[in-house]
Amino acid sequence: MKVLVTRLLPEHTQKRLQDEPLLDLVQWKEDRAIPRETLLSLVKGVDAIYCLLTDKIDEQVLDCAGPQLKVVSTMSVGYDHIDVKALKARNIQVGYTPDCLTEATADLTVLLALSVARRMKEGIRAAENGEWSVWRPTWLCGTQFSGKTLGVVGLGRIGEAVAKRLKAFGITRILYYGRSRKPQAEAELGAEFASFDDLLEKSDYITVCCALTVETQDLFDYQAFSKMKPSVVFVNTARGGIVKQDDLVRALEDGKIRAVGLDVTVPEPLPVDHKLYQFPNCIILPHIASATSETREQMATMALDNIVAVANGQPIPFGL
Ligand code: NAP
């Protein structure tokens, strides 16, 4: 089976890929996203595409590939870069990597929440820049979790893992917003289903953990930020497109929110002269929420398992 792989994979999975007897491999090996024109050219005649979230898989790619294309497997749990409807209409299977990155992503979400709540960026800069003089009672005071309300937008795998972790830090009330109620999470965590506005108005911490879809695109606009408590800590580790970034800048300028932690932006990478970098109360990480060696290897393996299953004429183990 001819497969296009759009990047070099983590060590063990790369070796397995190369040793896989059923696969005739075409691979983009440079340490940058495959250029669109190269993707469109290399995809011709392949039976399988192993892609990353940096590769847009749409009708044009499917047309270029040809009717023999059987599976698209992405090394990510998010699949907003894939036109799933178009693939399904052509009976092309879609594979992704749920569960294995839940823990790593939840850890980093908590790390961001803690970091911005405790003014980590300002603290590190102060220490490094020689602004650290005598111990002062109110210098660099942040806020803590005990007795606070957490609002989770999208109480899925990652959202629930974040809520569990922050509960251990002293959060006493968990609100969540999504398309459906989660009775198990309600029972286990005492989470309460809330309207979007209620969650915005009542939460001390808001974590964005939902998928990027047409419904969630630009969900957080200036109006949404204005409904939040001015003391709120806002963290987005899901997808940049869920936040209207110019509105976030305005909300920070207007003091509508206390602090922000982002692992995802639009575009990615976010240009170094972007205004968001200038706020002392905004920490930006370069989309590394799932970046532990263990998790990345597991993601790569699952995405390959999907391709190998199709090569063996079996159903994909991790499919949509
Ligand atoms: P998941 O279990 O499918 O959870 C997604 C959640 O999004 C679900 O609770 C779902 O609610 C909610 N949702 C979907 N449409 C919504 C809408 N219109 N309004 C409100 N909520 C909506 O997925 P997951 O494994 O937790 O991953 C969540 C997202 O995190 C992924 O889609 C990905 O984009 C992102 N992610 C980012 C990184 C990173 O490196 N920064 C790493 C991993 C994942 P319902 O259940 O009610 O439909």
Image (cartoon, rainbow, N blue to C red):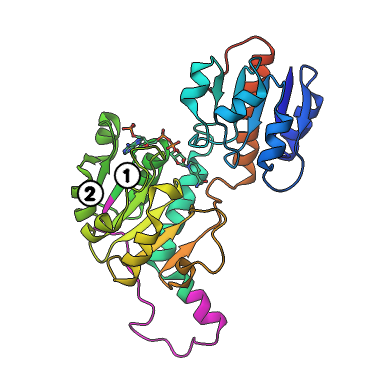
Q: Compared with residue 24, is residue 36 higher up or lower down, i.e. above or below?
A: below
Which amino acid is tagged 1? Answer: Val
Which amino acid is tagged 2? Answer: Leu
Magenta stretch: helix, strand or loop mostly = loop
Q: Give the camera-side residue of 164 and 105.
A: 105
Residue at screen point 56% across, 25% down: 95
On whether residue 79 falls in the magenta region, the answer is no
- The quadrant holding residue 154 is top left
Q: Tell me, yes or no, whether the two marked residues, 1 and 2, touch with CB atoms within 8 Å.
A: yes
Residue 292 % position (x, y): 60, 47
Alpha-carbon neighbours of circle 1 within 10 Å: few (<14), some, or many (≥20)?
Answer: many
On whether residue 133 falls in the magenta region, the answer is yes
Left or right, 156 with reference to 278: left
Residue at screen point 36% across, 50% down: 207
Q: Quadrant of ligand 1?
A: top left
Label 1 sits on residue: 153
Q: Compared with residue 194, is residue 304 higher up or lower down, i.e. above or below?
A: above
What is the magenta range?
123-150
Disc assigned to residue 105: none
- The quadrant holding residue 184 is top left
Asked if the residue at label 1 sits under 8 Å from ligand 1, the reply is: yes
Q: Is residue 6 visible?
A: no
Label 2 sits on residue: 199
Q: Secondary structure at mark 1?
A: strand
